[in-house]
Amino acid sequence: MEAIMATRFGGPEVLAPVTLPTPEPPEGHVRVDVASPAWAGWTHSSGAATPRRGLPEALAVLDDGSTALALLEKTPVAAGDDVLVLPGLGGLGSLLVQLPRDAVMIAAVRGPEKVKLAHDLGVRAVDYGSPDWTSKVPGVDVVFDGVGGPLGATALSLLRDGGRFSGYGMSSGAPTTVPLADHRRLASVADMSQLPEFWPETPRRVRQALTEAAAGRLIPLIGRTYPLAEAAAAHTDFEKRRAVGKILLHP
């Protein structure tokens, strides 16, 4: 069985490919074989295997699609709301901007190429790499923040009184700090402590996300796929925001 293992602390370079013994399931258990992008199958303890189709698009919505649905359940978006998603073209953000059908979704991205990609998904976009980007977002009703730090604080300041803030990530290295004054003026504030609350309903949301994707209503943005042995390179590209959308590994 091929795997990636980190045996010491460090950067992406500590992610090393290794070969491990293939586990044998005890009686009454199954061994799950997952492959991307070609197929996924399962194996009975009797040894009989049945292959199934597991497209990359399904893998791309499996986790992030479920989380996007959970965020919207926790912080609902109403028809006509102006909604800022930061970052707007990550694995999760690119799904989140597609789900509310009757709201004005604004993807916060960096660079003209990502602005165009957001437009291709049918959503508005602002380039937060531009020094005057906030002038193009006069005010919003909802902010979904997966970046945190100074950029998350700026997004927070764009919320109108009575707005809703949802923090779900800290790719900047620190979560967004919500001052007491903002707690008082906003209708709701959810921080990263909301994430464990989502777990019990994950199977239901996974089924919903896959159904939306199969119907063509949710289009995952797959930036790049890497062989499993190049997990360190994939991690580095993700960390430095070189890829757009979801990064996938395959054997």
Image: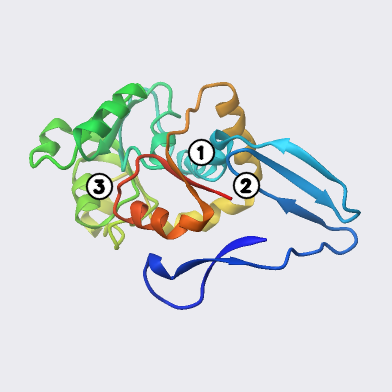
Query: SS for tag 3?
Result: helix
Q: Earlier in the sequence, mark 3 or mark 1?
A: 1
| In the rendered image, the vertical position of residue 82 relative to residue 172, given as above or below | above
Give the residue at x 55% y 28%. 213
Query: SS for tag 1?
Result: helix
Residue that mark 3 sits on: 185
Q: Left or right of 219: which side holds 82?
A: left
| Residue 251: percent from left, percent from top | 58, 50
| In the rendered image, the vertical position of residue 78 relative to residue 243, given as above or below | above
Mark 3 vs mark 1, foreground winner is 1
Is 75 or 227 nearer to us in this picture? 227
| Cα distance in 3D space between marks 2 and 1 | 10 Å
Is 94 or 162 nearer to us in this picture? 94
Q: Left or right of 55: which side holds 148?
A: left
Give the residue at x 23% y 47%. 156
Residue that mark 2 sits on: 201
Q: Residue furthest left?
A: 132
Q: Earlier in the sequence, mark 2 or mark 1?
A: 1
- Report which quarter residue 224 is drawn in: top left
Q: Amino acid at mark 1?
A: Leu
Residue that mark 1 sits on: 69
| Residue 117: percent from left, percent from top | 31, 28
Q: Amino acid at mark 3?
A: Arg
Q: Amino acid at mark 2?
A: Glu
